[in-house]
Image (cartoon, rainbow, N blue to C red):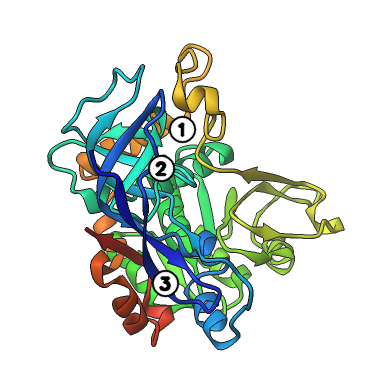
Amino acid sequence: MPTRRLAATLQGDGHIRLVEQDVPQVKAGQVLVQVHASLVSPGSEFRGGWRALCEQRDKPRSGVEPQTFGYANAGVVVETGVGVERFSVGDRVACMGAGYALHANFAVAPHHLCVALPDNVTFAQGSYAHLASTAIHTSRRGEPQLGEFVGVIGLGLIGQLSARMHQLSGCYVAGWDKIAKRREIASGWGIDSANSPAEQPLADLTREFTAGAGLDAAVIAFGGDATGVIDELDQCLKVSPDGHTMGRIVIVGGAGYTFTHRTTNHDIRIAARTGPGYHDELWEHGDDYPPVFMRWTTRTNLELCVRLIHEGKLNVDTLTTHSIDFSDVERQVDAILDEPDDILGVVFEY
């Protein structure tokens, strides 16, 4: 079994460097995976996306210890811990989990944070399972119904995936983002509408998209202060006969907001993580929750994501703008940062 691995670390100066370190010991309920692909989640990993990484390079932080990062990868099982019966050596798997599914050529993860990959799902596609599960959980929190109008504000990876999950639930979805490349990608995979709120007010865009009916629900899929956007959504949601706007607003990720009188009749929901189970160490490493009581856990959400990719209903390839050789990650990341707005899905390949 391997005893050393290469892992990507984020430096205080905003640069990514590879370091050699010990492979963690495989504990009971865990698997050791030789990683073949990992997906960058820039909003979480760089605390604000690729632009934030560029800004960190302009204003380096001193005294910051290098940190390993990443929480979504895919590869082949090379060792199983005590009690693991779901996987055998040689199985292809997608893995997730902060502190586990790192950007590294070997990773150790709890078995319930891993799911099997069908032969027709590539490792690069499998590395999307974590973020796709976050999007599924976002959709479940919003309780979409067939035929509803949904607006997604922010078309980063989570926004794109959330939009598609709402489509698969039978909704008509409009996506809004100021970055042209993101709108282009969303239009490419078939979102119902993609526009820039900088070019036309959200209220006007909504009126056109819903034929005056208003949105039934909205997803806030960006970080930072969302108070202004939520206030603007007040003019986009459906209106009751007594003049009150009503609808569901789901916030996924790190957006913050201040309640105002305009949100009185809005049903605001927070979508955290990937579903029940994640960060419950007993569940991650041990027995599953009874499905009769907990139908959709983090694991069953992961399995559904992989099935949707396998069946061609979720095309994550359209989201990948850059594939980077992990052994040359430092130089190749430097090369793409000249145009941060053109970056969406970045997959490290091993």
Residue 178 in sight in this render: no
Viewer-side residue, 264 vs 296: 296
Mark 1 and mark 3 lie on one chain; the one further toward the N terminus is 3
Residue that carries the numbered disc 2 in the rendered image? 96
Q: Secondary structure at mark 2?
A: strand
> Count of labels shown?
3
The answer to whether marks 1 and 2 mark residues whose Cβ atoms lie closer than 8 Å is yes
Graded by Cα atoms within 10 Å as few (under 14), some (14 to 19) or many (20 or more), the crowding at tag 3 reads: many
Mark 3 and mark 2 lie on one chain; the one further toward the N terminus is 3
Q: What is the quadrant of residue 335 in the picture?
A: bottom left
Q: Position of residue 310 (x, y in %)?
A: 21, 40
Residue that carries the numbered disc 3 in the rendered image? 16
For discs 1 and 2, the disc positioned in front in the rendered view:
2
Q: Position of residue 173 (x, y in %)?
A: 45, 55
The residue shown at (28%, 46%) is 74
The answer to whether marks 1 and 3 mark residues whose Cβ atoms lie closer than 8 Å is no
Mark 1 and mark 2 lie on one chain; the one further toward the N terminus is 2
- Vertical order, 55 against 220 (above or below): below
Q: Position of residue 177 (x, y in %)?
A: 50, 71
Q: Secondary structure at mark 3?
A: strand
The numbered dot on residue 298 is 1
Residue type at numbered disc 3: Ile
The residue positioned farthest toward the left in the image shown: 119
Q: CA distance from mark 1 to mark 3?
A: 29 Å
Q: What is the quadrant of residue 62 in the picture?
A: bottom right
Q: CA distance from mark 1 to mark 2?
A: 10 Å
The residue shown at (22%, 35%) is 78
Residue 234 in sight in this render: yes
The residue shown at (59%, 72%) is 204
Viewer-side residue, 220 vs 214: 220
